[in-house]
């Protein structure tokens, strides 16, 4: 029997969800107490409101994280396949990064000056990613904001093109969705005082005719995209899409910016290098410095020259591109250690092997329980989605969402010592992820899915 209708197991789902919530509350008294204390002074009870987006009855409180494991305030240990939503893609507290940060803290954190780490990192970024010129930021979102400014200045155009379903990051300009085939500001975008649809064009991913039609007006400065969509659920490019898209983009005088913050999981040089893409600019965030706040963005030689010429031709004064802590010495030391000693070819090979085991194990469990779900893998990252075949655009990916079921599965896995990303069903493997960690995930997943399918309500052993 293929389970296709989301309402088939609704009573079981609700009963299981109540049971899992009760189990979490019973097992996490210290987390609950800390969460209640934090409510007094933090908006939504957490330093970043996203931290309240997990499926837990109250915010889980972390005590420590090392390698592929995390320990909460109540002493429960978890195998971590979320890894800080990619920020800790190379594992928590990699020893080389810890040592570099400890050494640099004693020598100063920020001076608004450059040093030998910056020279080494610049050369390594150029070698790995194939773009000769770089700048730094504190997050990928900031890197994208800064790049948009440079690109608009360099091209003299003001419009941005994105694919429906967004991309990784929080640049206000990108929160435009296709609703009934028409662009519309995303309803959830708070506090926006101008209409982003005036400067942002949106088309479906993998739709070459729509892309060409949108570019023909000749006013698009750049296309900003992930090479594989991950913010709306994983959506792979169709064969030949990016090759044709790059040609169309350049034919119409626009530029291509690829955000590889998530798709860095594809290999030491990211997805573009692994698949022969040639972006005009590239953004890398979260994992590039072992989890410290840091991002970088690279320019082709031609774009770099145009950007520098635009700056030289502008009136003197602050450009508004960059922040005081950008390129600080601590981040540079962490980035050098990450690139030199952590994000190695061997590390990526290990990560991809473990991710392959995760993907195959999930597929086997899904088939065993006769579920019409699919699993997609991109390097060290994989995701299961509630449909029989992977989606090809953002609209299809969104149609597969089932927030209630996702919440149940995530909480049930957490109660069994396994953590996955709270946003849809994404999993990531690190160099520290072991085969035993993978097996723990697959055992927990199979148990949870079996209970859901069969309607059994089993309390299970305490999560210790």
Image (cartoon, rainbow, N blue to C red):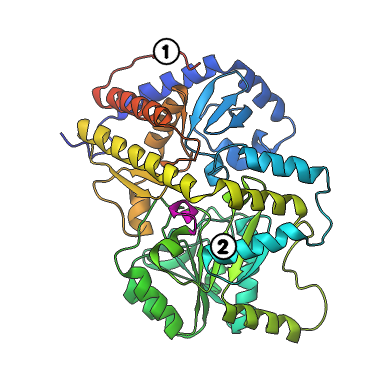
Q: Is residue 69 left or right of residue 243?
A: right
Write down the region rendered in magenta. Answer: 263-269
Q: Is residue 206 left or right of residue 32?
A: left
Q: Separation of disc 2 and disc 1 at Cα?
A: 44 Å
Q: Residue at x 63, y 57 (%)?
A: 295
Helix or strand or loop: what does disc 2 sit on? Answer: strand
Above or below: residue 282 compared with residue 457: below
Q: Residue at x 45, y 82 (%)?
A: 250
- One can see residue 193 in this view: no
| Mark number displayed over residue 169 | none
> Does 265 lie within the magenta span?
yes
> Does 285 lie within the magenta span?
no
Q: Is residue 395 left or right of residue 307?
A: left
Q: Residue at x 70, y 63 (%)?
A: 119
x and y, in percent, of residue 382 in the image: 38, 45
Q: Residues within 10 Å of mark 2 (few under 14, many from 20)?
A: many
For the N terminus, give its image quadrant: top left
Nearest the viewer among 247 and 436 is 436
- One can see residue 240 in this view: yes
Above or below: residue 430 compared with residue 69: below
Mark whose residue sits in front, 2 or 1: 2
Q: Which residue is mark 1?
A: 461
x and y, in percent, of residue 16 in the image: 37, 22
Answer with mark 2 or mark 1, whichever residue precedes in sequence: 2
Q: Which residue is mark 2?
A: 283
Q: Residue furthest left?
A: 1
Nearest the viewer among 433 and 165 is 433
Q: Residues within 10 Å of mark 1 (few under 14, many from 20)?
A: few
Helix or strand or loop: what does disc 1 sit on? Answer: loop
Q: Is residue 161 left or right of residue 36?
A: left
x and y, in percent, of residue 229 in the image: 42, 57
Q: Residue at x 59, y 55 (%)?
A: 285
């Amino acid at each position: 029997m293929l389970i296709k209708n989301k309402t088939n197991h609704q009573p079981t789902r609700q009963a299981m969800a109540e049971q899992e919530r009760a189990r979490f509350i019973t097992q996490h008294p210290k987390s609950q107490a800390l969460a209640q204390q934090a409510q007094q002074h933090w908006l939504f009870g957490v330093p970043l409101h996203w931290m309240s987006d997990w499926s837990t009855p109250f915010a889980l409180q972390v005590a420590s994280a090392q390698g592929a494991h995390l320990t909460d305030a109540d002493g429960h240990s978890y195998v971590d396949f979320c890894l800080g939503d990619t920020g800790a893609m190379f594992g928590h507290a990699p020893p080389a990064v810890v040592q570099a940060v400890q050494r640099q803290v004693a020598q100063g954190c920020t001076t608004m000056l450059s040093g030998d780490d910056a020279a080494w990192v610049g050369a390594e970024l150029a070698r790995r990613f194939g773009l000769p010129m770089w700048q730094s930021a504190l997050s990928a979102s900031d890197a994208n904001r800064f790049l948009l400014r440079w690109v608009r200045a360099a091209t003299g155009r003001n419009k941005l093109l994105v694919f429906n379903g967004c991309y990784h990051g929080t640049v206000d300009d990108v929160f435009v969705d296709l609703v009934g085939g028409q662009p519309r500001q995303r309803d959830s975008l708070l506090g926006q005082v101008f209409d982003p649809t005036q400067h942002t064009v949106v088309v479906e991913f993998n739709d070459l005719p729509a892309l060409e039609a949108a570019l023909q007006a000749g006013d698009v400065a750049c296309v900003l995209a992930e090479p594989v969509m991950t913010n709306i659920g994983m959506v792979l490019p169709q064969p030949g899409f990016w090759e044709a898209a790059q040609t169309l983009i350049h034919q119409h005088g626009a530029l291509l910016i690829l955000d590889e913050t998530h798709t860095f999981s594809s290999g030491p040089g990211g997805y573009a290098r692994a698949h022969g893409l040639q972006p005009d600019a590239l953004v890398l965030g979260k994992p590039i410095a072992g989890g410290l706040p840091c991002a970088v963005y690279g320019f082709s030689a031609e774009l770099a020259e145009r950007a520098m010429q635009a700056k030289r031709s502008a009136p003197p004064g602050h450009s508004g591109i960059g922040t005081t802590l950008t390129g600080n010495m601590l981040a540079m030391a962490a980035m050098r250690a990450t690139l030199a000693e952590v994000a190695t070819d061997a590390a990526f090979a290990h990560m991809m092997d473990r991710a392959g085991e995760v993907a195959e194990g999930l597929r086997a469990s899904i088939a065993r329980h006769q579920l019409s779900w699919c699993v997609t893998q991109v390097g060290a990252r994989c995701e299961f989605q509630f449909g029989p075949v992977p989606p090809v655009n953002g609209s299809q990916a969104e149609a597969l969402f089932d927030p209630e079921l996702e919440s149940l599965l995530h909480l049930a896995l957490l109660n069994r010592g396994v953590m996955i990303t709270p946003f849809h069903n994404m999993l990531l493997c690190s160099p520290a992820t072991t085969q035993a960690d993978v097996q723990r995930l697959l055992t927990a997943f199979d148990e949870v899915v079996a209970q859901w399918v069969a309607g059994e309500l089993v309390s299970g052993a305490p999560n210790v």
